Image (tube, rainbow, N blue to C red):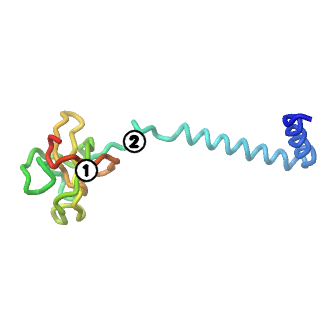
Amino acid sequence: MSTTALSKTAFAMVYENLPVARWARGLVVLFAAAVITLGSALVAPSPALAATPYIGSNSGGANARDCASTDCRFRFRLNNGRRVNMICWLDHQHVAPPSSDYGSARWFLVSTTDSGARGFVHSSLVESQVGVRKCRQNNVYG
């Protein structure tokens, strides 16, 4: 007897010996699992639809700077709710409240979603953060 025939026979023997109600319940559970799996795949957000990082600060906005420090030149202001693209991160000057929403040395180089203007913003002021690489240098040009 071939392996395929043996497998079919073993499968048939198992289900022939089960009561019909038990077999039907197994089929219903299997069908429900397939529907749930398929449904979750259809509703899962694609990366393109994932939340876009935006500015959220206790002070109403964030100052974008030339480098990752409050001592660096101010470039432009980003108001709360302003969507940004996160480019990279850098650990440099530690900033704590009240100058930030929480204490951290992490800064993000961000660009605006409309004009593409770039500047460093303290990490506590960026909501819906996404994973990005480490910056190669501490300025907006690198």
Q: Pointer 1: what residue?
A: 89
Three-letter residue code for mark 1: Trp
As drawn, 10 above or below 125: above
Relative placement, left or right, of 90 versus 5 is left
Q: Residue at x 50, y 41 (%)?
A: 44
Relative placement, left or right, of 34 versus 64 is right
Q: Residue at x 17, y 46 (%)?
A: 78
Three-letter residue code for mark 2: Ala
Q: Nearer the viewer, residue 126 or 68?
A: 68
Residue 119 position by quadrant: top left
Image coords of residue 45 (percent x, y): 46, 40
> In the rendered image, which quarter contains the C terminus?
top left
**What secondary structure is found at the residue carrying circle 2?**
loop
Among numbered discs 2 and 1, the one appearing first in the sequence: 2
The CA distance from mark 2 to mark 1 is 20 Å
**What secondary structure is found at the residue carrying circle 1?**
strand
Q: Pointer 2: what residue?
A: 50
